[in-house]
Image: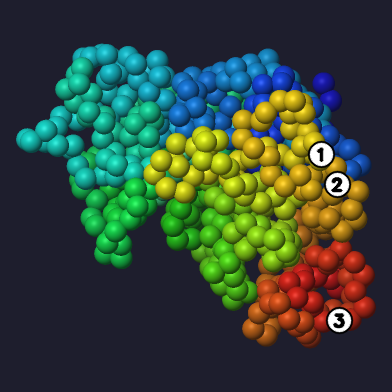
């Protein structure tokens, strides 16, 4: 079997110097006419991702969950950790996907969901069957309070109490998310061992890494004490209820890092693997999950602040501060990462104001994403400038919509052609399509399109040692412009980003060197930065 994955040498590590592309498997490509994306559909589209002259040029794919699930939370409620949901295919399809991806130099990252399983997972069905079942302690069961109330005041992320009453055994069980997502008890070593077996199961099949869902909650305060109220929030709609508390007891509990370190040990039993954690909060908190100075935690901790950049928070100064704060917090040897969007947040073009303004600004942030020091994560469709789709009420599917802003708008089918191309023309997709003018087909033909902008930047990034391996240094500039250099050896690149809607002078240190790329995908005459223009120069 040919395997075109770029080997990791002492100078090159795929999860540091490559680019990761997130696929929401339900929405990428349907291959069997049921309107639901599947793994064979992804196999059919691999050349688009890497391996052909016009491919995007990415090095790894992160799949949102592909396991059997009742889809209460669209796969983040896992009914069997060692299989593939029949909607997506089977284990043989996954094996074929891994093989075909590796042939094209693409690595496969699965979504590991350790904090909770589905309530239909056999483990939970056993656990809830009786108080003396051997798996009772695989989940978190507690007696009611004296008046029958829940054991503490914790609030589920999706709203409501985090405790569900079980009439059969007269106890509550904990669920930080939906009641269909009972929390696993990682303080029970049987659970920890069984979940490590899951990691081995997939790495034995050739999976290259894991995105670790809600890793910051897998252990909580062992005494399950109440969370304190959040002094800054006095009210919230259902979905926001969780914001009414300080999550000191149910998130980022101090000894979680011990469990993270043991996960890293298991992942390191296999060569050239990677684990990236879904973690939140300050750069210092994110660094905890890298393992601090020892760097014996996860290889990467997701750094989400750019996902919070929107129309209201749009400024060069704010973005530069986020970059510099994260760079400053990282211990020596730790590797940054950057992301503009994912399946839980409005699409970046929509967040930045939509329409022309959203497109121009998201191009600018894409240039930032692909030129900063660190691993960039691209969410499928970002390369087309796809926006949130306004899904009609009767077509909404996300359970979180019952508790607040749903997430269906950022999970709509990938748009391949004017007829959409995600599914056969006569097949209704599981969520509606967006603007038909936004498609791979229409943009491939347009040299200045977002798609060709991403292709050009990814190609430039891959060809430049400074951009993939070099250091980062900000440059002092006027208000509204963020500029920085990337350097390795003699390879020196300067990036200048104009966040304003007026012309701005290029940084006077901008080398009169070769202009490598501009967000406008043209050959500008003047040296000024046009509104919302980004430029990359080689010294
Ligand atoms: O998201 C976790 C999640 O919702 C957190 O971002 C939460 O909002 C945060 O901890 C609050 O401070 C992951 C998945 O990405 C999401 O799709 C799932 O719905 C969720 O876990 C449950 O598995
Ligand atoms: Ca399908």
Q: Secondary structure at mark 3?
A: loop
- Of circles 2 and 3, the one toward us is 2
Mark toward the start of the polypeptide (2 vs 1)? 1
Residue in view at x 45 percent, y 61 percent: 282
Mark 3 crowd level (few <14, some 14–19, many ≥20, 10 Å Cα): few
Disc 2 to disc 1: CB gap under 8 Å: yes
The reply, left or right, for residue 140 in relation to residue 408 is left
Mark 1 sits near ligand 2, with its Cβ under 8 Å away: no
Establish if 277 lies above or below 354. above
The reply, left or right, for residue 280 in relation to residue 106 is left
The reply, left or right, for residue 429 in relation to residue 535 is left
Q: CA distance from mark 1 to mark 3?
A: 37 Å
Residue 358 in sight from this viewpoint? yes
Disc 2 to disc 3: CB gap under 8 Å: no
Q: Which residue is mark 3?
A: 527
Establish if 133 lies above or below 360. above
Quadrant location of the C terminus in the rendered image = bottom right
Q: Secondary structure at mark 1?
A: loop
Q: Which mark is residue 442?
A: 2
Residue 18 in sight from this viewpoint? no
Q: How is the image coloured?
A: rainbow
Q: Position of residue 10 (x, y in %)?
A: 73, 47
Q: Secondary structure at mark 2?
A: helix
Q: Which residue is mark 1?
A: 417
Q: Position of residue 235 (x, y in %)?
A: 29, 58
Front residue of 393 and 63:
393
Q: Which mark is residue 501?
A: none
- Of circles 1 and 3, the one toward us is 1
Residue in view at x 49 percent, y 37 percent: 398
Q: Quadrant of residue 433?
A: top right
């Amino acid at each position: 079997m040919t395997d075109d994955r770029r080997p990791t040498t002492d100078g090159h590590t795929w999860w540091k110097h490559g680019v990761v592309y997130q696929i929401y498997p339900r929405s990428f490509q349907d291959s069997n006419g049921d309107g639901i994306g599947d793994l064979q559909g992804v196999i059919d589209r691999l050349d688009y991702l890497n391996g052909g002259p016009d491919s995007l040029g990415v090095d790894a794919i992160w799949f949102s969950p592909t396991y059997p699930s009742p889809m209460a939370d669209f796969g983040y409620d896992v009914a069997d950790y060692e299989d593939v949901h029949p909607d997506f295919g089977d284990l043989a399809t996954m094996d074929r996907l891994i093989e075909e991806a590796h042939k094209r130099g693409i690595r496969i990252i699965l979504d590991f969901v350790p904090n909770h399983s589905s309530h239909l997972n056999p483990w939970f069905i056993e656990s809830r069957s009786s108080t003396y079942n051997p798996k009772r302690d695989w989940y978190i069961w507690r007696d009611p309070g004296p008046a029958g109330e829940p054991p503490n005041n914790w609030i589920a992320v999706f709203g409501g109490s985090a405790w569900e009453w079980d009439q059969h055994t007269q106890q509550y069980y904990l669920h930080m998310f939906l009641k269909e997502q009972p929390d696993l008890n990682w303080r029970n070593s049987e659970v920890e061992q069984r979940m490590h077996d899951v990691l081995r199961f997939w790495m034995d099949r050739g999976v290259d890494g894991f995105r670790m869902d809600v890793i910051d909650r897998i252990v909580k305060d062992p005494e399950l004490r109440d969370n304190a109220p959040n002094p800054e929030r006095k009210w919230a709609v259902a979905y926001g209820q969780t914001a009414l508390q300080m999550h000191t007891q149910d998130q980022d509990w101090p000894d979680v890092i011990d469990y993270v370190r043991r996960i890293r040990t298991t992942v390191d039993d296999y060569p050239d693997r990677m684990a990236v954690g879904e973690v939140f909060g300050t750069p210092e908190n994110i660094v905890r999950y890298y393992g601090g100075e020892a760097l014996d935690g996860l290889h990467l901790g997701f750094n989400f602040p750019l996902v919070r950049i929107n129309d209201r928070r749009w400024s060069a100064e704010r973005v530069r501060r986020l970059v510099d704060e994260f760079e400053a917090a990282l211990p020596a040897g730790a590797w940054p990462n950057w992301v503009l969007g994912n399946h839980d947040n409005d699409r970046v073009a929509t967040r930045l104001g939509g329409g022309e303004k959203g497109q121009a600004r998201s191009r600018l942030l894409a240039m930032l994403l692909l030129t900063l020091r660190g691993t960039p994560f691209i969410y499928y469709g970002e390369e087309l400038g796809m926006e949130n789709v306004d899904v009609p009420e009767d077509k909404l599917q996300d359970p979180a919509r019952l508790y607040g802003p749903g997430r269906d708008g950022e999970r709509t089918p990938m748009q391949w052609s004017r007829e959409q191309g995600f599914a056969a023309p006569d097949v209704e997709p599981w969520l509606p399509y967006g603007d038909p003018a936004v498609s791979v087909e229409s943009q491939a033909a347009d040299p200045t399109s977002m798609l060709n902008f991403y292709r050009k930047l990814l190609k430039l990034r891959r060809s430049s040692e400074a951009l993939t391996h070099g250091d980062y240094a900000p440059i002092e500039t006027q208000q509204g412009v963020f500029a920085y250099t990337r350097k390795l050896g003699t390879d020196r690149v300067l990036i200048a980003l104009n966040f304003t809607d007026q012309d701005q002078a290029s940084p006077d240190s901008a080398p009169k060197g070769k202009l490598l790329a501009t967000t406008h995908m043209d050959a500008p005459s003047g040296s000024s930065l046009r509104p919302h223009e980004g430029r990359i120069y080689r010294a």
